[in-house]
Image (cartoon, rainbow, N blue to C red):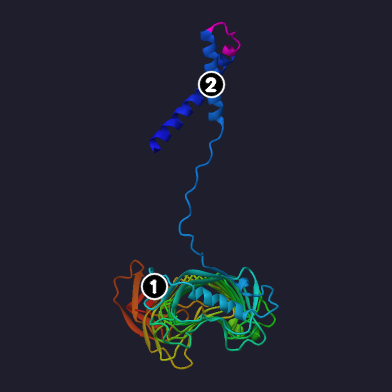
């Protein structure tokens, strides 16, 4: 059937080309002017009329082919909160309406054919659509059951009322009271919060994620919190990206900056990522007490370190395992307690912002601080500073601080390089205290000595290494150049 239809269409197409050609139309027009004088002429004109009719039928557009009937026809599972009675103007409390929409989204379906983590019910990508409204709530929004996944809440503003609990979170992924409702070791999996403005109204926090897996927080604006903008506790792989967080809405230079409190993001779990996030007010930008987290593309100007603020605080002594890359520390420093396997690179530090290594048990190991840019006010601030108020660093292993550039700040490194000239010198003393990071620690020394022609071939020796000073002596006074390189981290 299909081949016959294609052949017919092709035949009509050829005839159409013939009828539309100028030469054929000229002959056709001339032929119409000939008188009908005999039978043959009569048949000829009748044939021409048939061709005219065929031409008209082919030139007219064909009706479009009918589309196949839709398959499935299932509910798209998009829950519009206004249909549950939520007030998009924010004048009336919408807590119950939002919770009802969440309950229907969770209980509406169970896609058993698509496996998630053991004990996690797949709700099929159900969406709770806030429809661009502004909703007032008086208590935290929690899912009705533990152990669900593949759900999205998006597209609107949620604001805490004056009676909202001061220790609550606007959206709270905590387990339900019924702890037998799920056999999963995690509370939730693959829950996404997107395109939301969360206003805590100085009542608690924004989003709480407790012992959950693969949670996404994307393109959100979280403000007016007193505890945490986002709290991640236990679990794995919460990804926070393209989000703006600040206790007070400001763009820097706020007169009340000294009074800022709260924390933008607290990571108390492992394997999380914070990417392309701005934290514009709060005492601490990001607090990390979990392992193996990555922070990338973050701009912290939450509270200047000169006012007592911290941009990123790594409070996990000897278990840090954190990577901070491609970020911007704007008058706010990074503090790491007994850092272990810490990588900081390609980050810009402005306004005397620096990196502080804080001794708790005197251990620092596996550190890379490289390829960063520091800009300060010529106030003598070191780009990397040791806080040894609770005791010195006694165990220093595999620490590499080098290849950084600074203007208006004091350079510090674990590698020192000095070149000296001597004229009639037999003892060369090189002091590295100005540049070396750790006091009285040199693990490796390499030097070369070139002497002027005619000074013979004197003996030379590395005589002493102490207090970050290197002493090299020659068997006789010589004129020449000495190059010395030392390393603290090997």
Which residue shows up at 49% across the image and 47% down it?
67
Nearest to the observer: residue 284 or residue 172: 172
> Compared with residue 236, is residue 259 higher up or lower down, i.e. above or below?
below
Residues marked 1 and 2 touching at CB (< 8 Å): no
Work out how far the residue at label 1 is from the one at label 2, CA to CA, in angstroms.
68 Å
- The reply to whether residue 379 is visible in this rendering is yes
Q: Which residue is mark 1?
A: 116
Count of number-bearing discs: 2
Circle 2: is it few (<14), some (14-19), or many (20+) Cα within 10 Å?
few
From the viewer's perspective, is 78 left or right of 344? right
Instruction: Identify residue for label 2.
Output: 50
Q: Is residue 35 magenta?
A: yes
Quarter in which the C terminus is drawn? bottom left
Which circle marks residue 366 in the picture? none
Helix, strand or loop at disc 2? helix
- Residue mark closest to the camera, 1 vs 2: 2
At 54% from the left edge and 6% from the top edge, which residue is drawn?
38
Residue at (48%, 24%) from the top-left corner?
15
Q: Please rate how many residues cluster around mark 1, counting C-alpha atoms within 10 Å: few if below 14, some from 14 to 19, many from 20.
A: some
Q: Secondary structure at mark 1?
A: loop
What's drawn in magenta, residue-wise?
Answer: 30-38
Seen as rendered, the residue at the extreme front is 39
Q: Position of residue 116 (x, y in %)?
A: 39, 72
The x, y position of residue 61, in whole percent, is 55, 35
Residue furthest to the top: 37
Is the N terminus in the top left, top right, bottom left or bottom right quadrant?
top left
Does 137 lie within the magenta span? no
């Amino acid at each position: 059937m299909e081949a016959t239809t294609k052949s017919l269409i092709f035949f009509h197409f050829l005839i159409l080309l013939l009828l539309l050609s100028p030469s054929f139309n000229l002959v056709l027009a001339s032929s119409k002017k000939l008188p009908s004088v005999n039978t043959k002429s009569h048949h000829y004109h009748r044939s021409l009329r048939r061709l005219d009719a065929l031409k008209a039928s082919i030139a007219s557009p064909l009706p479009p082919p009918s589309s196949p009937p839709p398959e499935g026809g299932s509910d798209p599972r998009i829950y519009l909160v206004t249909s549950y009675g939520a007030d998009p103007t924010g004048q009336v409390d919408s807590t119950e309406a939002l919770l009802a929409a969440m309950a229907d989204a969770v209980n509406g379906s169970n896609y058993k054919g698509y496996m998630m983590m053991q004990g996690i019910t797949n709700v099929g990508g159900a969406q709770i659509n806030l429809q661009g409204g502004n909703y007032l709530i008086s208590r935290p929004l929690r899912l009705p059951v533990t152990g669900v996944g593949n759900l999205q809440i998006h597209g609107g503003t949620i604001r805490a009322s004056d009676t909202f609990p001061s220790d609550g979170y606007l959206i709270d992924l905590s387990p339900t009271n019924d702890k037998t409702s799920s056999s999963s070791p995690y509370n939730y999996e693959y829950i996404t919060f997107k395109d939301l403005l969360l206003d805590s109204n100085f009542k608690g926090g924004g989003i709480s994620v407790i012992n959950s897996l693969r949670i996404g927080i994307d393109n959100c604006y979280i403000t007016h919190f007193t505890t945490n903008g986002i709290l991640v506790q236990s679990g794995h792989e919460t990804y926070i990206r393209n989000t703006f967080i600040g206790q007070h809405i400001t763009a820097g230079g706020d007169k009340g900056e000294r009074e800022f409190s709260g924390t933008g993001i607290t990571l108390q779990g492992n394997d999380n990522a914070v990417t392309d996030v701005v934290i514009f007010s709060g005492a601490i930008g990001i607090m990390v007490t979990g392992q193996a987290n990555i922070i990338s593309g973050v701009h912290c100007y939450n509270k200047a370190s000169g006012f007592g603020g911290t941009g990123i605080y790594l409070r996990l002594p000897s278990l840090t395992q954190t990577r901070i890359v491609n970020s911007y520390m704007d008058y706010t420093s990074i503090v790491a307690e007994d850092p272990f396997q810490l990588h900081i690179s390609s980050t810009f530090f402005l306004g005397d912002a620096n990196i502080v290594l804080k001794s708790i048990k005197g251990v620092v190991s596996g550190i890379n601080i490289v390829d960063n840019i520091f800009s300060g006010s010529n106030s003598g601030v070191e780009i990397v500073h040791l806080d040894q108020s609770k005791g010195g660093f006694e165990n220093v292993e595999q620490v590499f601080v080098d290849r950084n550039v600074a203007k208006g700040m004091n350079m510090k490194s674990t590698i020192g390089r000095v070149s000296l000239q001597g004229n009639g010198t037999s003892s060369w003393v090189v002091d590295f205290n100005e540049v070396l990071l750790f006091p009285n620690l040199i693990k490796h020394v390499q030097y070369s000595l070139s002497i002027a022609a005619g000074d013979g071939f004197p003996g030379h020796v590395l005589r002493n290494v102490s207090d970050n000073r290197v002493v090299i002596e020659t068997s006789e006074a010589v004129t020449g150049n000495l190059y010395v390189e030392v390393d603290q981290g090997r």
